[in-house]
Image (spheres, rainbow, N blue to C red):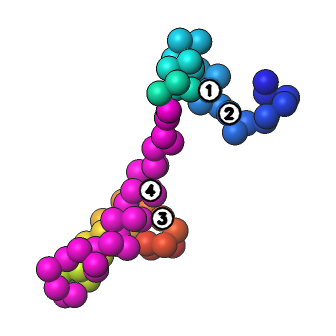
Amino acid sequence: MHQMYGHDCGSLYDLELIELAAALINGYEIGKSPEETLQEYYVEALHTARDEATGHDIQDAIRYTLETLGIKIEGVNA
């Protein structure tokens, strides 16, 4: 399978046969990474905050926290 599909199927290699069958029958969804989740929250902060100033405060707090931790996320602080 690796030679045929490459590295993109890495999470499938760890599934037992019954787990794979359940995913195919019931459906499955690829979860977002923590970075993707935070980036989405960052973008939505202005739209969901009670006012624009609060939205900017949320974004500032996120950027400050990421800078303090030395983390770069595309679309947020990179």
Label 2, label 4: how many angstroms apart (C-alpha)?
Answer: 21 Å
Residue visible at 39% across and 65% down in the picture: 40
Residue denoted by label 2:
9
Element at label 2: helix
Left or right of residue 3, residue 52 in this image? left
Residues at marks 1 and 4, CA–CA distance in whole angstroms: 22 Å
Q: Secondary structure under badge 4?
A: helix
Discs 4, 3 touching: Cβ within 8 Å:
yes
In the image, the segment drawn in magenta is: 27-53
Per the image, the residue denoted by label 1 is: 12
Is residue 68 among what the camera can see? no
Mark 4 lies on residue: 35
Q: Earlier in the sequence, mark 2 or mark 4?
A: 2
Residue in the picture at 50% in, 32% down: 27
**Distance (Cα) linking label 2 and label 3:** 24 Å
Residue farthest toward the front in the current orientation of the protein: 25
Query: Given the image, on which type of amino acid does mark 2 rest?
Result: Cys
Q: Vertically, is 57 above or below 23?
A: below
Q: Are marks 1 and 2 in contact (CB under 8 Å)?
A: yes
